Image: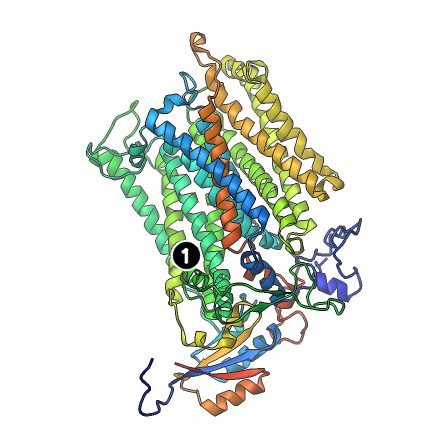
Amino acid sequence: MTTLEPDKAVALGLVDKPKRGGDPVTIDGTMIDDPGVRAPLVLGDRDFKSVTDTICGWIEMKTPPWWQMAFFISSGIAGLGTAMILYLIITGVGVWGLQSPVMWGWAIVNFVWWVGIGHAGTLISAILCLLKQQWRTSINRFAEAMTIFAVICAGTFPGIHVGRVWMAWMLFPLPNYNWIWPQFRSPLLWDVFAVGTYFTVSTLFWYMGMIPDLATLRDRAIGRINQKVTFGPMWAPHPMPKFVKQMTTVTIPANRIAAYFYGILSCGWRFSYRHWWNFEKAYLLLAGIATPLVLSVHTIVSFDFAVSILPGWHTTIFPPYFVAGAVFSGFAMVLTLLIPFRELYPGMKDFVTAKTMENMCKIITLTGSMVGFAYIMEFFIAWYGGNPYESQAFVIRAFGPYWWAYWAMFLCNVISPQVFWSRWARTTPWFIFIVSIVVNIGMWFERFVIVSTLSTDFLPGSWTYYKPTFVDVMTFVGTMGIFGTLFLLFAKFLPMLAISEVKNVMPQAHAHLHRHDHAEGDHHNGEGA
Amino acid sequence: MTQLPTEPVEPKVWGLLAEFPDVTSVFDAAHKVREAGFAKWDVHCPFPIHEMDEAMGLKPSQVPNLMGGAAFTGVAVALLMQWWMAKVDYPILIAGKPLFAWEWALPITFELGVLFSAFAAVFGMLALNGLPRPHHPLMSRPEFLKAGDDGFFISIEAKDKNFDPEKTRELLESLGATGVEVVED
């Protein structure tokens, strides 16, 4: 059975033309139950121009008051976090609650949590690209930006945890006055390379994908230098229906700075197909190499724990379990950010459809179940392995002093994502939003549970109850402020949706669709995924 | 700017820029322009049109070769670096473990292979495209601002040996171009 393209299905009369609005069955027209019919990816009868106008309009419109408020708050929190980091640097790591034997504490919990969140972006852009999941086009730019900012927050923690921050450059194999080199046999050094590579490759991927869209913004800025731009309200379907009397004129101050800013960043892209040809090849191959990369990063992060010989850490299940957890928390964070943005930016719902959200919920349920399986498997192996230290570590995890963290983790990560078996849960944005936050809390607890295993080490005399200090908490909250600030700046100045990619998945983009007499006749449409 | 040239200067023609109304028409026109034997011509579209490479008769991209070369370089650099630093320059014996083994060298080797090829992908793509190039004669045409929005264009350079100002214009118009403009250099 072949899979029908949406507009072919409409033409054959199999489904109604998608309409926006409160349809209880198909929500916004995309929740089609027939598996043979592909859901439309762009709603609202949009043409290419209206796609450009809407996505660029979010940048060109007057800065909304909610943005200013959000920016004020998040940059304030970021400032607080920076003050805490400064306090740490001028005083020492003793301002944190670290104590022997818990030498890693919140710093590594937060590091692993943020790196995990940073996995969704490249997963969406790379793995879903290779799997030809076209619904990714409306969320990939957004998720990639989130990835980069999350990795920035993650990288902060090991950087400040080294104690003497001014020596952090010794993490890298650089010549120094002692003539020694880093210890390549240590997973901590692999981590430096893994996270460093991941950050660099994610940034390159993000930037390269953005070059054509930056060129679009440049061209619009050049157009604005001399004339006003007139376009309809961003929520409006295009072409405009007759009853809308007047096209709203949006006066945007002619902006030479924007033309130069986007002009430099776009490298002089001129939409030449000869350029697109190299671009597409580079993009596809970057996706190809980013796929094993994204799987390797959290694998190597898990080696930080798994390569040690501590009971409860020294397990081979850690790499797959960390990767599944990372994808799980990353998708949750994408949804946490996406749902309010989808409400706040006019017209965004035409791109981020109910189907897209549903797909993400399904991935959350899948990865949440994998994580749940791993939790249960860990317990089973701790018992089945017959190692008394291993089983003791797990009994302490679930019933020891940190029992509340363990069960909070279990509830948030294993039980809560199962709600998405219900169709109502998958299609109700406010509910998805709540679950996504619950999942993020649960994933933080997962890392906390792993790290708190340190507090009951081999020597019962040194067992302690590890508690964070005010500085610990505020540094963590501060990184959320840094994350929020960076994300708001991204939403304000860079295209949040991949304009050229969205256009590419629209039915009008296919030259072959309306013409079947083409000599070669090798149509990609209708071949089925 | 205040001094006007004393003699009228003949503007140098860079080529022709033809606008097409939609994907199908620019796709078909690209086929015909290629069959007419042009070599120095291009299609400009806001997104990569599917199978346009076949219509234009483009050769395979060189990006994969660049990336492959960079990946091998990255792997070689990583292995040499780890071997030299850990075994040759400053050997530290820990727990009787070998000073160098490919097993523990693998994660960094993989990461550097990926890192180098990612740089090759982005900067190789830009270099093959002759970018960054802030200005191009085509950008002097106001219609061309639509190329990133909903405009589909074919440009033919005057340098092409088959180029003839009148005949090429007629060809483009016969292919369904809605407007053909002369681009000055």
The residue under the point 34% across, 46% down is B75
Quadrant housing residue A412: top right
Quarter of the picture holding the C terminus of chain B: bottom left
Instruction: Using the image, determine if residue A165 lies above or below residue A265.
Output: above
Residue A346 percent across, percent down from the top left: 64, 55
The residue under the point 56% across, 31% down is A443
Label 1 crowding class (10 Å Cα cut-off): few <14, some 14-19, many 20+?
many
| Res. A300 in view | no
The residue under the point 26% across, 34% down is A181
- A486 with respect to A128 (left or right): left
The residue under the point 29% across, 24% down is B96
Give the SS element for disc 1.
helix
- A438 with respect to A208 (left or right): right
Protein chain holding label 1: B
Residue B28 percent across, percent down from the top left: 58, 78
Residue B42 percent across, percent down from the top left: 47, 75
- A168 with respect to A390 (left or right): left
Q: Which residue is mark 1?
A: B121
Give the colour scheme shown.
rainbow
Please tell me which residue lies in front, A377 or B97.
A377
Quadrant housing residue B68: bottom left
Residue type beneath disc 1: Ala
For this orientation, the residue located farthest to the top is: A461
Please tell me which residue lies in front, A475 or A426.
A475
Instruction: Using the image, determine if residue A395 lies above or below residue B51.
Output: above
Quarter of the picture holding the N terminus of chain B: bottom left
